[in-house]
Amino acid sequence: MSQLVQAEITDCREPAPGVWVTEFLAPSLAQAAMPGQFLHIRCGEGSDPLLRRPISIHSVDRLSGRMKIMFQVVGKGTAWLAGRRDGFLDIMGPLGRGFTVFTGEQASHNYNRFIVVGGGIGAAPLYFLLQEIARAGHAQRVKVLLGARNAHQLLIPDAAEELGFAVRVATDDGSAGHRGLVTDLLAEELQRKPDYVYACGPSPMLKVLCAMLNDAGVPGEVSVEERMACGVGACLSCVCRVKDANGMEIYRHACVDGPVFSAGEVIW
């Protein structure tokens, strides 16, 4: 169930050019949050900007109650947020449908090899997913593929390795890892027949990735990027086309039915 909290800011830093990480204390949110969900944050002191900003959850420490968001400065709201060094954030959340985290017998018998694919700032919510997978003791079963324009914009490779994951990277300019797209790396990994793929990144990347999974017959989940205004399914600003169980085209809200959807469900 979503909550409305005043969360005390405890840290703010810029790990990559234009990318910020804000840490805050929100014990009740930390207990309720699941990987892939997002927070709706008021970014301003008054009514400008009027609308809250939807930002994915980057990491959670359930014991201490500390949470982090990782975001890119793209406008007035996120610029305001990047300038906060102390004080409190007005946060509504956790919101949306997150990733499926397999545990117990299901993870042991049906899903043994996973791939996690992040493109650009899309790597931000995947770190929380990796935290939960590592906590379940399945880090050795997962290959993490990360892509960015250059080495300076690669996010979370070191943090993922510290959790025990094997990481491969791709950059457009070849300044780190494979020169090319992260989907090039995915094509290689699909030949090894993984059981499940998680992904988050720009829509062109996800469109290609979903087609690759469909061709390979590999299931997975993707977190889509849509503009969200209300965050609770009332304003229709984030509708996206998906297939229902009978293959019929229907519309869903990314904010309440997503932002995580089955890879075979989204119509690109």
Image (cartoon, grey):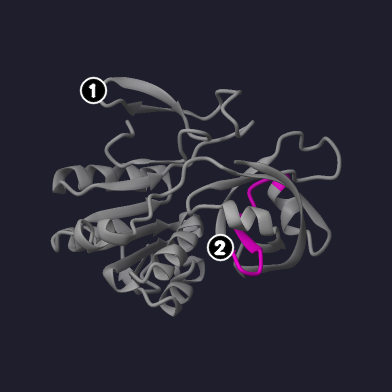
In percent of width and height, residue 185 lies at: 26, 63
Give the residue at x 68% y 43%: 3
Residue with the most extreme right position = 46
Along the line of sight, which residue is nearer the eye, 68 or 268?
68
Quadrant of residue 171 within the rendered picture: bottom left
**In the image: residue 223, left or right of residue 184:** right
Q: For mark 1, does the 10 Å Cα neighbourhood hold few (<14), some (14 to 19), or many (20 or more) residues?
A: few
Amino acid type, label 1: Asn
Q: Is residue 71 magenta?
A: yes
Amino acid type, label 2: Ser
Q: Earlier in the sequence, mark 1 or mark 2?
A: 2
**In the image: residue 121, left or right of residue 246:** right
Give the residue at x 72% y 62%: 25
| For residue 144, above or below residue 79 | below
In percent of width and height, residue 206 lies at: 35, 45
**In the image: residue 190, left or right of residue 249:** left
In percent of width and height, residue 68 lies at: 62, 62
Number of numbered callouts drawn = 2
Q: For mark 2, does the 10 Å Cα neighbourhood hold few (<14), some (14 to 19), or many (20 or more) residues?
A: many
| For residue 50, above or below residue 104 | above
Report the disc number at residue 246: 1
Quadrant of residue 183 within the rendered picture: bottom left
| Residue 32 visible somewhere in the drawing | yes
Q: CA distance from mark 1 to mark 2?
A: 36 Å
Q: Quadrant of the N terminus?
A: top right
Q: Is residue 83 magenta?
A: no
| For residue 167, above or below residue 224 | below
Give the residue at x 27% y 38%: 264
Q: Which residue is mark 2?
A: 59
Q: Which residues make up the magenta segment?
A: 60-77
